[in-house]
Amino acid sequence: MNTVMVRNFDQTVTMIPSYALISDSFINWRGMQESGGRRIKRSLYIDTSSIQFCTEEMMEHFKQIHYLKDYIVNREKEIEDYNHVNKVDRSNIVNGGH
């Protein structure tokens, strides 16, 4: 019995019986080889009842996180500028950006 050695895109080697190349179908993964990566699908479950606007206390806590600080400061400025330019009435939480 003969086998065919196939090198996968991630440089691993697989031994396949030669009859499998004729009797079975296979997929050409050249696109994955050229991109140098593999896509992995993962599910992310979010409890929609837990989503809410951040409070001032939460924002101050998040600003203490190194990776979030610059983003939060810039985003707050963008939202404030947008609300100011469009003269948004912030008396109701639904109006404007947050």
Image: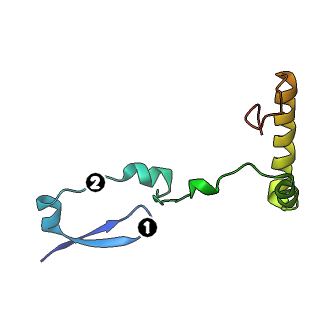
Residue nearest the observer in this picture, 51 or 20: 51
Residue furthest out toward the front: 92
Amino acid on which disc 2 is placed: Ile
Q: Is residue 80 above or below residue 30?
A: above
Q: Please name the residue shown 88% across and 61% down the image.
A: 64
The answer to which image quadrant residue 4 occupies is: bottom left
- Judging by the rendered image, the residue that carries numbered circle 2 is 27
Crowd around label 1: few <14 · some 14–19 · many ≥20 (10 Å): few
Q: Please name the residue shown 86% across and 57% down the image.
A: 57
- Judging by the rendered image, the residue that carries numbered circle 1 is 11
The Cα–Cα distance between marks 1 and 2, rounded to whole angstroms, is 17 Å
Residue 3 placed where, x, y %? 20, 73
Amino acid on which disc 1 is placed: Gln
Locate the N terminus by quadrant. bottom left
Q: Is residue 4 above or below residue 37?
A: below
Q: Is residue 98 above or below residue 68?
A: above
Answer left or right for 12 relative to 77.
Answer: left
